[in-house]
């Protein structure tokens, strides 16, 4: 993995993901971890969405943790995003706090039963979209092997792009968008890798790379938050975006934002 923060974008283009360490300080990561552990519990209240085994993700925009969302303003994080996106950008949706408690999620590399998925399919080529968005996960505790880490198949976004050109494949996977080693997918190098990193690191990923969280076999939970940034559009597009902002962000959160945060989300 490149050590220079200006090199990770090429790694993202080639592999569909990239890692940058030491974005938050140890103290900042510890602060975020304490907030997540206080707000998200193993139980399953109505505030949780997309429950996969022991993974808990808050519904958005219904729910929000403004203290966690505000890390989107971290200067080093914004610098990284500025290298990923060409031109001005904004935070596009309410950040999603996620905790993966010990237990089963989507299988484990150790057991050979891990399965992945993609976040839908795009109708435009990856290299045409690249530079317009940045999906990232900010980590608040060390993510170690078998600790519930996001697992990816490097380079699979290009394989998916080719595969979905086949109408039959696309129709089948739109109804069951999961992938396993047993499928023997022609031409796909099935080499899933866990994304391990230290607290305070950032993991960028492309939604069409085959990925998923893995089982957490360790006693400590995985503590992350997902942020989505996109390139700003033409003035008319940004006006339209402001009209839908209450569909993408929690209304109570919007009401307590300071001007810096409002500017980042495109409210002003």
Image (spheres, rainbow, N blue to C red):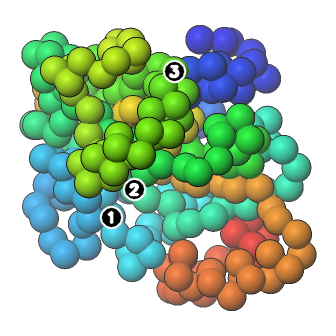
Q: Residues within 10 Å of mark 2 (few under 14, many from 20)?
A: many
Q: Which mark is residue 193?
A: none
Q: Is residue 60 visible?
A: yes
Residue 88: percent from left, percent from top: 85, 55
**With respect to residue 40, does 60 lie above or below?**
below
Mark 3, secondary structure of its residue:
loop
Q: Are marks 2 and 1 in contact (CB under 8 Å)?
A: yes
Q: Are marks 3 and 2 in contact (CB under 8 Å)?
A: no
Q: Residue at x 18, y 36 (%)?
A: 106
Query: Residues under labels 2 and 1: Cα distance?
Result: 6 Å
**Front of the two marks 1 and 3:** 3
**Front of the two marks 3 and 2:** 3
Query: Residues under labels 3 and 2: Cα distance?
Result: 27 Å
Residue 219: percent from left, percent from top: 14, 30
Residue 136: percent from left, percent from top: 55, 43
List the residue tagged with mark 1: 58
Q: Which mark is residue 97?
A: 2
**With respect to residue 116, does 34 lie above or below?**
below
Q: Residue at x 63, y 19 (%)?
A: 14
Q: Is residue 62 left or right of residue 244?
A: left
List the residue tagged with mark 3: 155
């Amino acid at each position: 993995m490149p050590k220079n923060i200006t090199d990770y974008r090429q790694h993202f283009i080639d592999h569909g993901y990239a890692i940058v360490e030491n974005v938050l300080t140890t103290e900042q990561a510890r602060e975020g971890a304490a907030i997540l552990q206080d707000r998200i519990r193993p139980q399953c209240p109505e505030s949780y969405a997309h429950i996969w085994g022991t993974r808990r993700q808050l519904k958005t925009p219904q729910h929000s943790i403004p203290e966690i969302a505000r890390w989107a303003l971290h200067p080093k994080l914004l610098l990284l995003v500025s290298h990923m996106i060409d031109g001005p950008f904004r935070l596009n949706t309410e950040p999603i706090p996620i905790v993966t408690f010990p237990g089963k999620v989507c299988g484990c590399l150790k057991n050979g039963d891990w399965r992945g998925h993609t976040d839908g399919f795009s109708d435009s080529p990856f290299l045409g979209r690249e530079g317009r968005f940045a999906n990232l996960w900010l980590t608040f505790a060390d993510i170690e092997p078998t600790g519930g880490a996001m697992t990816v198949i490097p380079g699979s976004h290009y394989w998916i792009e080719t595969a979905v050109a086949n109408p039959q494949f696309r129709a089948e996977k739109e109804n069951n968008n999961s992938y396993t080693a047993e499928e023997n997918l022609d031409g796909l190098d099935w080499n899933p890798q866990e994304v391990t990193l230290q607290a305070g690191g950032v993991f960028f990923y492309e939604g069409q790379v085959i990925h998923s969280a893995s089982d957490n076999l360790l006693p400590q939970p995985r503590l992350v938050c997902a942020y989505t940034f996109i390139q700003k559009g033409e003035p008319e597009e940004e006006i339209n975006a402001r009209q839908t902002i209450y569909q993408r962000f929690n209304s109570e959160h919007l009401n307590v934002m300071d001007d810096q945060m409002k500017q980042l989300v495109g409210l002003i």
